[in-house]
Amino acid sequence: MMMGLLAFESNQGLWNSGYYSQLFGIGGVMVTVAILWLSTGYFGGIGAPFAPYFWPYLGQLPKKKERKRPVRVYMDGCFDLMHYGHANALRQAKLLGDQLVVGVVSDEEIVANKGPPVLLMEERLTLVSGLKWVDEVIPNAPYEITEEFMNTLFNKYNIDYIIHGDDPCLLPDGTDAYALAKKVGRYKQIKRTEGVSSTDIVGRILLTFKQKEAGGMETTTDANQNTGATCDKVKSQLSNFLPTSRRIMQFSNGQAPSPGACIVYIDGAFDLFHAGHVEILRSARQLGDFLLVGVHDDQAIRDRRGYRPIMHLHERTLSVLACRYVDEVIIGAPWEVSRDMITTFNISLVVHGTVTEGSSVVGIDPYTVPKSMGIFQTITSPKPITTVSVATRIIDNHEAYKRRNLKKKASEDRYYTQKKFVAGD
């Protein structure tokens, strides 16, 4: 990361404010001698006590600012089925220091402590590295902050503080995974983001996709079309996220494109934000100066694909905004890119990847206008991952993830039952 350069105060008072002219008045010779005493030891190193006439001017001399080492903070996690809650946790962690180092827990440690991970290590590293607040990533970090690893953090990575949320992180034996960091006074706590967790998302997937068929995923009906116990079950898996304008502002860059900038536009659902999304956004950003992303609303996705997204519009918007390659987002972007939209946002190039989720609506090309204007480009998707392919991993291992969720849900229920207000951002 950029280190603070040595800087000097711009203070010309000694020479430009009349002081220098006073050197030629009464006692001017003594002041000149005093300068030589202090700066060069010209007269055998005689010190400041013999230069009383110079003391009033000592504060006018340029001072060299001290070079301050950046505060480095560490936060770890599994970051499996990464969501805006993870992103917000890392955003808060970054506020506690100057540089954020993130440890991504290994697959083996996740299996031992929580159950099988959904995403591969490579995919989780891509997601974490793609967040705008992350400066450095440590792969295969341990689940528990052991004394050995803690010393590695302090000595090798120059970590000042270890960060975790206010929700408990317990080892299989019931002990606190961060006990040692707390004991040595190098632990800081942030506020957990309400309304979402990986456990919650797995539950939504298990409920939404009942079985995998050769032609795709069969979905359940909406909550308002169910009755009785089924309806209650569906409602229990709906998002509890309460979106606020302040949260969106915290995730936003808050910057407009500069005059003459090449504005690139890409749109999509960006459901279950995954490594494929990060890589296609990276590729799109490299084609211009400013990346504008359109996130389709829930109903538009339902109408085209036949099922609602797992994450609702505001959840998906935050995940996209958290990506370091994204400059701005259109929330609830229109399915078809119109000429008016291109003019309004001064779009230079419209791009689309080669890997898509597919559509049940045939014959409608949302990119007809940009194609006719000669500003459309298809870019190769770096990864073949889709939302459905991620969901399929869970469906194919239904029983394993069901057991994992039951185990995690019990601890989450205890957290919400005993939860108290925690001040935070």
Image (tube, grey):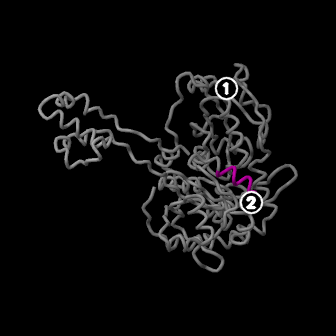
**Which kind of residue does numbered mark 1 sit on?**
Leu
| Residue labelled with disc 2 | 118
Q: Residue shown at 68%/34% (left/top)?
A: 284
**Measuring 72% from the left and 20% from the top, which residue is drawn there?**
374
Q: Quadrant of the C terminus?
A: bottom left
Look at 71% across and 42% down and name the residue there.
Answer: 279
- Residue 257, percent across and down? 54, 29
* 127 magenta-colored: yes
Quarter holding residue 370: top right
Task: Please give the range of residues in magenta.
Answer: 117-128
Viewer-closest of 291 and 145: 145
For marks 2 and 1, the one nearer the N-term is 2
Image quarter of the N terminus: top right
Q: CA distance from mark 2 to mark 1?
A: 35 Å
In depth, the one of 112 and 316 nearer the eye is 112
| Visible residue check, residue 359 | no
**Looking at the image, residue 423 lies above or below residue 148:** above
| Predominant SS along the magenta part | helix
Is residue 212 or residue 260 the one in the foreground?
A: 260
Above or below, 252 relative to 391: above
Q: Which mark is residue 349?
A: 1
Give the class, few, some or many, for how many residues have Cα within 10 Å of label 1's Cα (few <14, many ≥20).
Answer: many
